[in-house]
Amino acid sequence: MSSLQQHDIPADIACCHDYERYAEQILPQPHWHYIAGGSGNESTLKANNIVFDKFGLQQTLLPDINQINTRVILNSERHENPILVAPIAYQQLAHQDGELATVQAANAQDISMVLSTLSSTSLEQVAQYQTSQPLWFQLYIQPDKEHTYDLIKRAEQAGYTSLVITLDAPINGLRNREQRHQFSLPEHIQAQNLQPYSQSVSNQAATGLSSQQVMLSRLLAQSPRWKDISDIIANTRLSVYLKGILTVSDAKKAKELGAAGIIVSNHGGRILDGVPTSIEMLPLIRQAVGHDIEILCDSGIRSGSDIFKALALGANSVLVGRPVIYGLATAGAMGVAHCLRLLKDELQLTMALTGCASISDITIDKIRLP
Amino acid sequence: MSSLQQHDIPADIACCHDYERYAEQILPQPHWHYIAGGSGNESTLKANNIVFDKFGLQQTLLPDINQINTRVILNSERHENPILVAPIAYQQLAHQDGELATVQAANAQDISMVLSTLSSTSLEQVAQYQTSQPLWFQLYIQPDKEHTYDLIKRAEQAGYTSLVITLDAPINGLRNREQRHQFSLPEHIQAQNLQPYSQSVSNQAATGLSSQQVMLSRLLAQSPRWKDISDIIANTRLSVYLKGILTVSDAKKAKELGAAGIIVSNHGGRILDGVPTSIEMLPLIRQAVGHDIEILCDSGIRSGSDIFKALALGANSVLVGRPVIYGLATAGAMGVAHCLRLLKDELQLTMALTGCASISDITIDKIRLP
Amino acid sequence: MSSLQQHDIPADIACCHDYERYAEQILPQPHWHYIAGGSGNESTLKANNIVFDKFGLQQTLLPDINQINTRVILNSERHENPILVAPIAYQQLAHQDGELATVQAANAQDISMVLSTLSSTSLEQVAQYQTSQPLWFQLYIQPDKEHTYDLIKRAEQAGYTSLVITLDAPINGLRNREQRHQFSLPEHIQAQNLQPYSQSVSNQAATGLSSQQVMLSRLLAQSPRWKDISDIIANTRLSVYLKGILTVSDAKKAKELGAAGIIVSNHGGRILDGVPTSIEMLPLIRQAVGHDIEILCDSGIRSGSDIFKALALGANSVLVGRPVIYGLATAGAMGVAHCLRLLKDELQLTMALTGCASISDITIDKIRLP
Amino acid sequence: MSSLQQHDIPADIACCHDYERYAEQILPQPHWHYIAGGSGNESTLKANNIVFDKFGLQQTLLPDINQINTRVILNSERHENPILVAPIAYQQLAHQDGELATVQAANAQDISMVLSTLSSTSLEQVAQYQTSQPLWFQLYIQPDKEHTYDLIKRAEQAGYTSLVITLDAPINGLRNREQRHQFSLPEHIQAQNLQPYSQSVSNQAATGLSSQQVMLSRLLAQSPRWKDISDIIANTRLSVYLKGILTVSDAKKAKELGAAGIIVSNHGGRILDGVPTSIEMLPLIRQAVGHDIEILCDSGIRSGSDIFKALALGANSVLVGRPVIYGLATAGAMGVAHCLRLLKDELQLTMALTGCASISDITIDKIRLP
């Protein structure tokens, strides 16, 4: 990581969540609120933050295990940890090293990154840093079909192995907090992947949609339909994960369409305030779709204990978003690596205390339901 | 709006509720507490503020809609939005432009206003500003029957199309907060509609009733009875809406009397502390009275999401009170217009994300019950 | 009230509960904590403060009533209001006029006072101020039987009409807050009724029992037994009310013993922390004992709305304690009178809005159960 | 106690929990957080602090008892109180007199101490202060079996009568708060009992395990198994209590292994955040194992009322940890003695008010379930 900024890890960081207070101090206020905020009254965001504590754990006394193995198979790939870095837009908002810091730190921790369509670094440039860990690409379907397929082709060519299509953000959420602080994207930070497609501003652009929804009808007309999803699945050699699913019926639909997996997510509470937490819906969805489709989960994961609970409730893996960005803001690549390391350590310790030698031992009887 | 004061909209207003903190700063303390306060311990007022968050939303992924239409028919009139400005007394307390600012701003947003009997501007003067949107008149029945019928006749002649009769305020509530701050109506603000009826102070006068209920018996004797309501329905060509209904039996009674509609309301928590929230009672009342009577709803609506939930639970439209007044206090007509605009935008966005192209698509399965 | 101190009522008192913040400022800290505090963690005290808000009210629209009558019969006496002043020890701690201020203010409001055994004014002196309203006497049974019967005889001779025997305080509660503030009774304030019985310090003395319960066994041995209660009932011509009952079985026992009534009470949360609120137990007790025994209720009554709820849940009357003392501390007799007046007014207004013309109309369907 | 430091008891200590705020002021911040903190988000720690208040009490009016007797038989020994001092590591962190102050103060209050393996004073030295009350020894099984048995032999020889084996801490919990404050054991404070076994650092050492769990596998391999427990039970003449049990199945296993008793405990919320409170599990465990095995309980006991509730829910005795340390930090041996005295007094007073003359009278009907 020689080209990256070097930082010291603050001495009082004990868990990855501790990076939040540093990020709040370091970031310009509008950036902070853009990243940390949610939509509406933030009731879903708040629920994300407290729902994990409603599930308890069941310790196993004197477990007869000598080693902890956290390996999982996702997308037929071996992942050393059931953790991915969630797709997060414009990471240069948090730190000038942006996505390049994140991908290198994640690789150093044997963790895969899901790169956002709205990356402030191009997908090709990020792919140069791929090492042992596979890279995944998150796709926002573009108003122009040609652009969408070009993005997919570029991801394929650059070596990305999975396509995570976000379904829940045809338009931006009402992010009141962000608007109150008048966040706007600085000039020098741009959606690099979309530069080739001039004039075509994505619906999902972080800024530009004020409360005046003058363009609502236009946006709706350009929004993807389910047919677009099945077309993509049929026309890419990448595995497709559908992200933003919160109901049993949408999960079943994803399975019927041939998705490799679904990502149970409420987009970190950033789209429609009032939707449920991922963790509430996860067991219902797992029960409905069975075990021949992968289920990933995000929104609210802040500790190894949270990861453990998500796995116990039916997830194959989790994605972690904001904590990574808070680590990035605080200490660049070092912060990201440390943040991920803390999550891994906590997961292993939780497994040790609950008597789980491997991920498949993490079953629902290891947690206490609310 | 040339005769109205011009104001700037504060840059950090992201939703209509954000006007509240401005209003609190701008208004004289007694006025603020008169407007914002409720009765007793304010337990109903507090419940109004939190009950909506207990209902979640259900997003629809990739909805196949191109346009959002918010039109509804109320009182056989076309309303562009399922929103009315609630009847609010003495709007000059909030801003010198008072009801004239509100009616013009509402009209500009294609929203109808319900003018209060206790308007600080006469109903005739307000009616001069009627444009495309119908005007409704809220009636407090007067101690002297002749005055009541004179008010109705004046409303008819001035072009109001509906009569909203308030049933829940035969006497003022125990507004402890208001009394603690020794609110009294300033000399220059008066119930203009009641000027012709000298000596006849309405029971509902905002002031004058201290805790010493020396006149309780007299007030009770002069209070309206159900017979007065049926007499009015029989003797006006205006459609009659009965406001303040919170029980199934009263809703049924309203229907039997031939009311055009009912307004489920706890009067913004200002009359009897301890009564339920509108939103709790709404589905029970809709189920009991069926669909051949209109149900409107107020008390606690602070966002487009709240409007959506009320509609999903059975309302044909909502009324919005305090937020409008907070917008008025902050930025006059501009504030009212902006406040209403934000509500409309939020409603449309919520409809888009839940896959509702028109108001009739907003059904109970779009929300998550507590 | 010519011999009493004259005070102004603070202008921002809107309900009797508003006196609390004045009392907190006016009283010496130890006195304040002695009066306001409860036992242990104050969980029962806190429950008293919030339990009433769990019960809602049901408004009656357009009630056909012309007058509100709050008269009740208690102990075969006509009481103009279903309110008594609860027995409270050492009222000179709150104000130099002490019990004399309270009794006169209560009489002026047509409300009866229950004088405490631990009054800082003798029962004979208080009785001189009896007017239209009957006076009741609260009895702490004394270690020496002779003293107990002497107290009863004195109460009879002085014209008291009822004897309220407190059952729940054989020893003081663990009033941690009071001890933290090192409350002790000032020299000049004494239990005047007990002066004749030298050497005989009541178990219930407000002070002197530190956490070191060196005398616990002695206290227990001297504590009253049920046999003492039945003996007193047999040997006094006063009606006997048993105070401190919180269970169905104790209520039934009281009825069997021939008590005129019971007082459902947790002693204002001052004895055993963790006991239930009166209002929770009230309907169960009423159901168990039927309607041929009077049930009074205290602990937590702070408004006319609270009184209404207690009556709806089965009480014939309530007793009000701390608010009276807060009124006394703030404005002497004027404060007490004003406090009681506010309660009466609130009760009447609540009755008007719920359509209750008389106390017997206050039935359980007028409230909303939690 | 002549060799101990003399301190004054602060005048505003009314209950043993009041020592907490003094300890927080007196102790160096890292020490304070090491002692007061829990693992993870401290959700179990917080639950410990509030769970007791969910259980209410049932007062008995006019109980016919003359004396309170708190004696219990534990381990065939007579204990004057159902209270032991919980095993707490490194008590010199709280006060220079450390374990010597605690044992003498406990003895003075007729209360037994359970000495920790990680005592900052050797078990032999502590045993010199044994008086009438039996001493118990808490055992952390050591990586080297020989050391474990040497510890046991030393405890036997020094006159300890019971062995409390801690099962729930094969590795340290994730004590984030402690790490945030960079606690580390001062040079001069050491695990004196382990000095003879050089190179053998216990897994349970309070420090040294940062979040980097580099040694997790090694630690797990060295952790005790159930077989080690049964071996110890077979090879010591001490009675064995198994500590850290929170499930019915582990309780049954302990009984099958021939343990004299179990200690229902979540280790004060210090090991695996998310495990249940002791008090929740206690009645289920008692019901499952019957009455021919002793059940002790700790984690969250802060008052005599808490002790009463634990006994009512099935415990034979409780252990008290942090309050003792807070007393020690505040006022040395005097503080410990006062703290224990307050607990005893509170228990007796609670028994008096609930009509319990002896510990066996404390049955489940004396409390109110949540």
Image (tube, coloured by chain):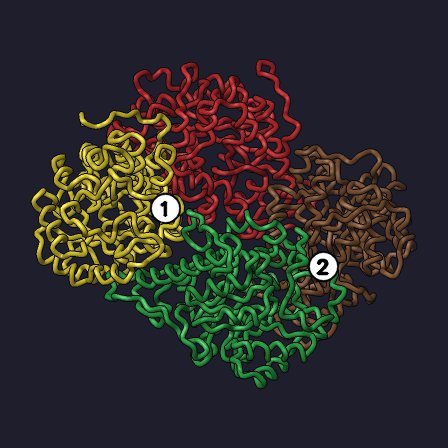
Chain colours: A green, B brown, C red, D yellow
Q: Considering the numbered disc 1 on the image, is that residue within a helix, a strand or a loop?
A: helix
Query: Which chain hosts label 2?
Result: A
Q: Is residue A269 left or right of residue C229?
A: right
* Circle 1 residue: D178
Residue at 23%, 52% (x, y): give it.
D263
How far from the left and from the top, in percent, is residue A361? 33, 70
Of residues D104 and A116, the one drawn nearer to the viewer in this rendering: A116
Instruction: Return the chain for callout 1.
Output: D
Residue B190 image-quadrant placement: top right
Structural distance between the alpha carbons of marks 2 and 1? 45 Å
Q: Residues within 10 Å of mark 2 (few under 14, many from 20)?
A: many
Task: Give left or right: position of B278 versus C237.
Answer: right
Image: A55 above or below B40: below
**Same subunit: marks 2 and 1:** no
Q: Which mark is residue A211?
A: 2
Residue A316, horizontal then vertical, whole percent: 43, 72
Residue shown at 47% from the left, 61% from the top: A1
- Give C193 or B137, whichever is nearer the viewer: B137
Residue at (53, 31) in percent of width and height: C323
Coordinates of residue C272 in the picture (x, y in percent) = 37, 38
Residue type marked 1: Glu
The residue type indicated by label 2 comes to Ser
Q: Are marks 2 and 1 in contact (CB under 8 Å)?
A: no
Sort mark 1 into few (<14), some (14-19) or many (20+) by Cα contacts within 10 Å: many
Task: Return the residue nearer the eye: B192 or A101.
Answer: A101
Q: Considering only vertical position in the picture, is C92 above or below A135?
A: above
Left or right: B263 in relation to B195: left
Q: In the image, residue A110 lies at what x, y percent?
A: 41, 67
In the orientation shown, which residue stands out farthest toward the front? A2
Q: Which mark is residue D257?
A: none
